[in-house]
Image (cartoon, helix red, strand yellow):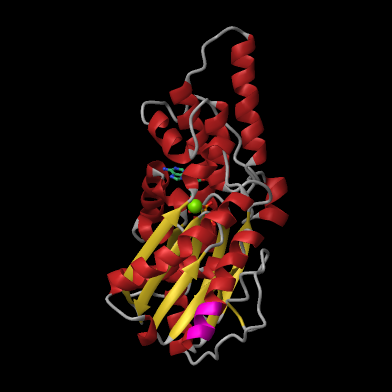
Amino acid sequence: PLVLGIETSCDETGIGIVRGRTLLSNTIASSMAEHARYGGVVPEVAARAHLEALQPAIEAAVAEAGVELSDLDAVAVTSGPGLAGALMVGVGAAKSLAVALDKPLYAVNHLVGHIAADILTGDDVEYPTVALLVSGGHTSLLLVRDLVSDVEMLGETMDDAAGEAFDKIARILGLPYPGGPEIDRAAATGDPNAIRFPRGLSRASDMAAHRYDFSFSGLKTAVARWIEQREAAGEPVPVADVAASFREAVVDVLVTKALDACAQHGVPRLLLGGGVIANRRLREVALERAAAAGVAVRIPPLSLCTDNGAMIAALAAELIAGGAAPSTLAFGADSTLPVTEIQVRG
Ligand code: ATP
Ligand code: MG
Ligand code: FE
């Protein structure tokens, strides 16, 4: 089926068009720059930016795909989870479009969309797989037995998302937003073993209840305190070493828990998604340790790892191929939509 997907859960206005498992276009407009001076995504700013970006993004995606809106078999949209106001803009636009074109509408789960992105790489995708989604808004470890019917949340962050942690530490180090790429750069010349920062929820006492959950607030506090002590002693802060050691702590805990989940569930596959996958050390450590553990790692291209509309269209196309009925117009934006709700019927 020819499907147009609309994604507005955070700061990317994503419009993607797919024909079945084939990617035709993937237009992304980001309001990241507008949030830079606040050091993080401001919900109201994101929602207004979506309103302005949607129409031109739809036109661009349709033109690039070389199709007409009237050719579409369905419209798909992210219903949640994400920022309520931002989601509402996409949901409203999708409903209008579907009604105006008289096309079926599929409301889908953003996190499962991230997993569906992998289908568009053209390689054969196998399930079950463990999936690690790491971005500015989420840090989730999922067990995917079947993309359209069986996705289980193994664990998620109890406080900051991994990308958020990068952004906050960058701020402490005086580096600009978004902090991930800046820390990656600063860390390149640093020693990852210079400072031993804590790996959240990894102690034996935490593992019983939080084996697959993450926590980055303790790490953030530890880094801040370490820097303060340095400054109080009148010593210079070794930015490269702090960045490298911090990055190592985040990467270590992410990869350790993901591979633990693979072993525990007997699943020799790990899919990585989300904007933090751009991190060079994370890719390196994941590939290295997975190879040693006999786990096959899949990393889609970054344009499919960050928030985008194509992954939403791809998930809807799979639902349609599986015979799923469209959503009714009764669904809304659900900022806390659980991952088990792959499609929202309304
Ligand atoms: P969502 O959480 O809804 O998927 P988001 O916009 O918050 O959306 P992304 O756009 O996927 O997340 O990713 C942005 C985040 O990724 C930012 O927090 C940024 O700092 C982080 N990031 C980007 N590049 C890197 C990198 N090289 N290393 C670490 N973090 C990175
Ligand atoms: Mg983003
Ligand atoms: Fe996302």
Percent position of residue 35, x then y: 54, 43
Residue 269 shows in this picture: no
* Residue 77 in picture, x, y percent from top left: 52, 73
Residue 141 percent across, percent down from the top left: 56, 60
**Residue drawn at the location 30% of the way across and 71% of the way down:** 63
Q: Tell me the quadrant of the picture where the N terminus can be found.
A: bottom left
221 is higher (above) or lower (below) than 134: above
Res 19 quadrant in image = bottom left
Q: Residue at x 47, y 68 (%)?
A: 115
Q: Position of residue 66 (x, y in %)?
A: 27, 76
Q: Which residues are magenta?
A: 96-100
Q: Residue furthest top?
A: 234
Q: On screen, 95 above or below 336?
A: below
The correct choice, above or below, for 117 with respect to 184 in the image is below
Q: Is residue 226 magenta?
A: no
Q: Relative to residue 18, is residue 223 depicted above or below? A: above
- Is residue 234 in sight in this rendering? yes
Task: Give me the residue at 47% from left, 22% from top.
Answer: 239
Viewer-proximal residue among 57 and 202 = 57
Please tell me whether the stretch drawn in magenta is mainly helix, strand or loop: helix
Would residue 84 be found to the left or right of residue 139 on screen?
right
- Residue under the point 48% across and 57% down: 12
Residue closer to the observer: 193 or 28: 28
Q: How many marks?
A: 0
Query: Residue 343 appears in which quarter of the rendering?
Result: bottom right
In the image, 306 versus 59, the foreground residue is: 59
Identify the image quadrant of the C terminus: bottom right
